[in-house]
């Protein structure tokens, strides 16, 4: 069974590794949406794969680190693409959420990256 809990945060960033003519080279902001996908068996007693309140508690410190910050200033996010943000969240959330199966990061409703712990390029 898979469950998904979504979170939102506001943050600014710029992409330092694109040409200066690229519009994302300049500082700008997004209303990000993060989806944490957990997968596992349904506990016969609780009826949960995981308690959504526990997921919220586990993700809260990361959310505080991202929300209303400049992502380029967050350690490990010097090049804060959606792909890097998803992997950054995975690396930090997975120890607290062992059933984490994927992290989706939406920069816009139409553009997102999904990371499931695979090797990065």
Image (spheres, helix red, strand yellow):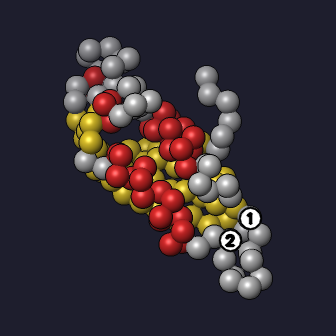
Q: Position of residue 115 (x, y in %)?
A: 59, 42
Camera sees residue 33: no
Residue depicted at 23% across the width and 35% down the height: 28
Q: Earlier in the sequence, mark 2 or mark 1?
A: 1
User: On the picture, is 108 further left or further right than 43?
Assistant: left
- Asked where in the image residue 120 lies, by quadrant, the reply is top right
Residue depicted at 43% across the width and 49% down the height: 62
Q: Which residue is mark 2?
A: 49
Q: Which residue is mark 1?
A: 40
Which quadrant would the C terminus be assigned to in this image?
Answer: top right
Which quadrant would the N terminus be assigned to in this image?
Answer: bottom right
In front here: 64 or 39?
Answer: 64
User: On the picture, is 99 further left or further right than 89?
Assistant: right
Camera sees residue 61: yes
Whether 42 is drawn above or below 68: the answer is below
Q: Position of residue 37 (x, y in %)?
A: 60, 58
Whether 15 is drawn above or below 44: the answer is above
Q: Position of residue 70 (x, y in %)?
A: 27, 36
Residue depicted at 47% across the width and 65% down the height: 56
Marks 2/1 in contact by CB < 8 Å: the verdict is yes
Residue depicted at 74% across the width and 64% down the height: 40
- Asked where in the image residue 96 lies, by quadrant, the reply is bottom right
* Crowd rating for badge 1 (residues with CA inside 10 Å; few <14, some 14–19, many 20+): some
Label 1 element class: loop
């Amino acid at each position: 069974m898979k469950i998904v809990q979504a979170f939102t945060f506001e943050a600014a960033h710029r992409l330092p590794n694109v040409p200066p003519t690229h519009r994302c080279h300049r500082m700008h902001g997004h209303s990000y949406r993060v989806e944490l996908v957990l997968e596992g068996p349904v506990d016969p007693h609780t009826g949960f794969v995981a308690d959504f309140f526990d997921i919220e508690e586990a993700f809260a410190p990361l959310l505080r680190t991202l929300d209303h910050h400049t992502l380029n200033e967050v350690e490990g996010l010097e090049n804060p693409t959606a792909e890097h943000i998803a992997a950054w969240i995975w690396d930090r959330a997975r120890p607290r959420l062992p059933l984490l199966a994927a992290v989706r990061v939406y920069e816009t409703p139409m553009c997102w990256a999904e990371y499931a712990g695979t090797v990065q390029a």
